[in-house]
Image (cartoon, coloured by chain):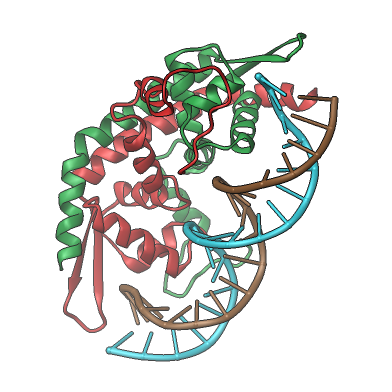
Chain colours: A green, B red, C cyan, D brown
Amino acid sequence: MSATHIDDTSQAPDDQLAADACAIWPDGGRNIRQTLDRIGDKWTVLVIGVLAASAPLRFGALYQRVPGISQRMLTLTLRRLERDGLVTRTAYAEVPPRVEYALTPLGESLRVIVTALAQWATDRNDEIESARRDFDAR
Amino acid sequence: MSATHIDDTSQAPDDQLAADACAIWPDGGRNIRQTLDRIGDKWTVLVIGVLAASAPLRFGALYQRVPGISQRMLTLTLRRLERDGLVTRTAYAEVPPRVEYALTPLGESLRVIVTALAQWATDRNDEIESARRDFDAR
DNA sequence: CTGTATCCCGATAGATACTG
DNA sequence: CAGTATCTATCGGGATACAG
């Protein structure tokens, strides 16, 4: 981070170059990186998808419906989503304990975006597969 | 993976539950996970953004414009993108070597989607920040 | 039921040096 | 210039056991 790489005849400082280069992203790429750090992990979008399908859901129900997730990862994922305001957690003072999770409107708005991404993946899947075959065949 | 977790009175097998639960995603979540595996890493979207701004670009130009990336990671990222048909690599038989990278139409179409994600991040940033402050303040 | 607490391993990626 | 080769550190995440 401290040492940047300059080994050519460029006059402009790195930061200037970077700013110009990343002009496509609203804020130079920081925003999109943060977002991908949130949803790019192994479980987040799956949990969102499950909640979008039928909320509210209890911890155990989520645990069943997200195939392969561990209790640990489910807890961590839900905490992160709750912290970012994408999911609500409602604990009922009962015995045995009951806790329900649901998407907030903010979470719902993310689901829409991620669904668009999934749609892209579906539409372009064949194209990507064939590109990959071509590449690997070389 | 082999042992699934069933510890309630559910009658339906896990797979059935999972299939129902993930109905939001076109293919039960596999597609979206694959896509996030591709673009969810640290550098891919940044490289795409830089290429979208001003392609074609040489290896060295990319190296400068993606702040903080190493040669190794730039190479790996470009190879993956090339393999998936998102980027073209054009090598010119010259001395010294010259190689130019550019987005394919497929890559461009992904950029559009990812830009929408970035837009979401920008629009909802304040909301997320405040949700996070509230959560951390508890 | 709804989580925590540990331990541990493999994958990701940073640093550095070297090459056609 | 455009990479490759190695080595290493970090970290997400799995397995397991335990607790309120």
Of D14 and B90, which appears nearest the observer? D14
State whether residue B69 appears in this view.
Answer: yes
Q: Is residue B133 left or right of residue A126?
A: right
Residue A127 percent location from the top left of the image? 16, 44
Of B52 and A112, which appears nearest the observer? A112
Q: Residue at x 24, y 73 (%)?
A: B98
Quadrant hosting residue B97: bottom left
Residue A7 percent location from the top left of the image? 46, 75
Q: Quadrant of the C terminus of chain A?
A: bottom left
Vertical relation: B10 (above or below) A136: above
Quadrant hosting residue A25: top left
Vertical relation: B23 (above or below) A133: above
Residue A106 percent location from the top left of the image? 52, 17
Q: Residue at x 20, y 55 (%)?
A: A132
Q: Is residue A84 left or right of residue B22?
A: right
Vertical relation: A86 (above or below) A98: below
Number of residue marks: 0
Q: Is residue A114 left or right of residue A136?
A: right
State whether residue A27 appears in this view.
Answer: no
Of A60 and A120, which appears nearest the observer? A60
Q: Quadrant of the N terminus of chain A?
A: bottom right
Residue A59 percent location from the top left of the image? 61, 22
